[in-house]
Image (cartoon, rainbow, N blue to C red):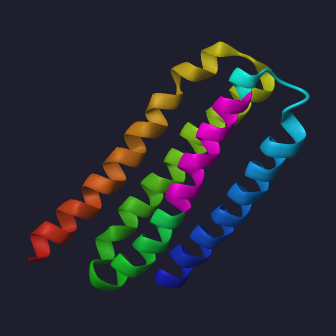
Amino acid sequence: MSAGWFGTGAALAAVGVALGAFGAHGLKSRVSPEMVTVWETGVRYHLVHALGLLAVAWAVERWPAAGVAGWLFVAGTAVFSGSLYLLALSGQRWLGAITPLGGLAFIAGWVWLAWLAWRAR
């Protein structure tokens, strides 16, 4: 299972870098500076949680239940970053209303990892 999480994290990181490059080079002439900032926020959290999946790959070897955090990070990336990408591209402000759900998934994933580590002490 750890190889699966590591591979998923690496793949999400590659996609995050590509989306960051697109934002830096392809969006600036097409959307407002405010929407470029929204895009960059999505990329930042996308990349941080791609690295978080690498941590999950390490953690799942010690605590198999760490896979829960991996699923939360994947869901958080899809909802948080995905909604920001769509918001930046479409300008549909209602998408910002679902972004916090992805943030909650991120928080839950980190809390889950912390709880597993503290419980194992």
Residue 9: x, y in percent? 57, 68
Q: Visible in this render: residue 117?
A: yes
Q: Is residue 23 above or below residue 12?
A: above
The answer to whether residue 95 is above or below residue 76 is above
- The residue depicted at 49 percent of the width and 73 percent of the height is 54
The residue at the point 64 percent across, 64 percent down is 13
Q: Residue at x 28, y 83 (%)?
A: 62
Q: Residue at x 55, y 62 (%)?
A: 50
Closest to the observer: 80 or 63? Answer: 80
Indicate yes or no whether the magenta region holds residue 44: yes
Q: Position of residue 103 (x, y in %)?
A: 43, 38
Residue 33 rendering spot, x and y as whole percentages: 75, 24
15 in magenta: no
Q: Position of residue 89 (x, y in %)?
A: 79, 28
Q: Which residues, given as a range, are shown in magenta? A: 36-50
Q: Is residue 39 left or right of residue 96?
A: right
Q: Is residue 36 above or below residue 12?
A: above
Give the quarter of the image for residue 29. top right
- Which quarter of the image is occupied by the C terminus? bottom left
Q: In the rendered view, does 10 fall on the left or right side of 86?
A: left
Q: Nearer the viewer, residue 38 or 59?
A: 38
Q: Is residue 66 left or right of residue 3?
A: left
Image height check: is 78 above or below 62?
Answer: above
